Each structure stands twice: as structure tokens, then as C-alpha cells.
Amino acid sequence: MNRPIRLMTAALTVSASLFLAACGSGDGDDASDGIKGADTDGGGKASASASARPKGAERPEIKLPSEFTATFVNWTNSDPKVQRILDDGREELRAKYAAIIDGDPDSDAVAFYDTGASLVTARTWIRSFVETDDSLIGEIKVYDAKAHVTDNGAGVLFYCVDERKSSTKNRRTQKVTRTPDSPDSVLQYRARLTKSPRGVWQTAALETVPGGCK
């Protein structure tokens, strides 16, 4: 069965109350603020490091084919600590897209950037595409990122993902199924991250909210 890329919603959503309780509170940008701008072009250029690997621990190289583009708009912050969360959060999302396209639910890159419940659900989501022999084509726009480190040391990252120009493509039949052009195809991602001993901000919990970027 073909289905839009936004199946992420069903596969990765966790309890909002549990998620917010785990995040705690912290200084800096308030990640609980509503994220606006789903109908804009992001208001600026994509980050210059949109496809570069973060510095620090040896990161896996993640490549996406030319028929699928993930554009990260204004994915920068003047605070180096926040920028590291943005960098690893970006690569976590790119790793999942690459794993779907490669048909590899056991991707080492996904395991590098996800941990705990988030790793289990990410693999479930990727496997659902593998089972139906579907890949991804088109364009994803990721924008309006807000991140901070909480008082208890967790990272929080909210951002918008516009999937309206993306599609699934069946490898066997070549059938293309477009993502619906509706507000629900613009999702708000709410991630809680923990820093690994190697200094990598790994996604530990993730909630997706269809239409959350209205």
C-alpha cells in the first residue's frame, strides 16, 4: 500500500504530556512557543552547512540522492551549544530519510543519532517503507527551528517540516503517490535529545504534530 511520507506521524508520536515532562525547563528560546510560517519560504537562505557533518565525534557520512532534497532553512544559531543541537538534529532527520531510500531499517547512521524509544520507532517507520518497497522523491523543507538546553541537561528541539512537495515512489511499479497538499502535511517536530558520552546529541523522544506549524 502506497502512502504519503507523513506516516511519520503515526509511527513516531509519543505522549505530549510525557514528552514535555521529560524536557523540564531551561533558559534561552522557549521551545514550546507556537511555530509559524508554514506558508512562507522560510524568510532566508538555507544554512551553509545544511549537508555538512557536525564537528566533534566521528559522524557518519549521510548522502541523499538528487531526486530527493531536504532543505534546512536558517538552521543556525549564534550560541555554539544550541548550534550543536541543531547540527545533530538535522543529521538525525537526514539519516532517517537516507535509510528509507536505501531500504535499510538497521542503518548505522540512524542508530548513531537516535537512542532508546526514538530508535525503536524510527526503525519501525523505516521498515514500513521497506515492506511496501517504497522510496522517497521530491523535496522536504525544514525550517523555523527552536532549540535550547534544559536545566536538567536535556536538549529540546522544535522545528517545522513541509512535506507537500514530497512523494513516495514504489521501486517495483514506479507508481508515485504524492503527499496531500494540505495543512496537515506541514508537521511540527518536537524532539528531546540527550548527549552521549561521545558528545553527540541523540534524539531520545520525538513527537510529530500534523498541522502544528499553522
Image (cartoon, rainbow, N blue to C red):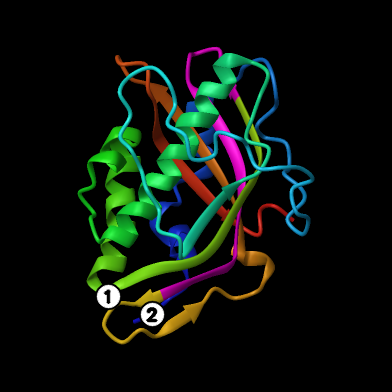
Give the structural element (helix, strand or loop) at label 2: loop
Q: Is residue 132 above or below residue 24?
A: below
Q: Position of residue 128 (x, y in %)?
A: 29, 66
Q: Position of residue 71 (x, y in %)?
A: 58, 50
Give the structural element (helix, strand or loop) at label 1: loop
Q: Which residue is mark 1?
A: 132
| Kind of residue sitting beneath label 1 | Thr
Classify residue 24 by image quadrant.
Answer: top right
Mark sitting on residue 3? none
Q: Position of residue 53 (x, y in %)?
A: 42, 31
Magenta stretch holds residue 72:
no
Query: Looking at the image, do the residues carrying marks 1 and 2 touch, with CB atoms under 8 Å apart?
Result: yes
Quadrant showing the C terminus: bottom right
Q: Residues within 10 Å of mark 1 (few under 14, many from 20)?
A: some
The segment highlighted magenta reads 148-168
| Kind of residue sitting beneath label 2 | Asn
| Residue occupying the point 41% across, 66% down | 136
| Residue occupying the point 37% across, 48% down | 63
Q: Is residue 80 above or below residue 72?
A: above
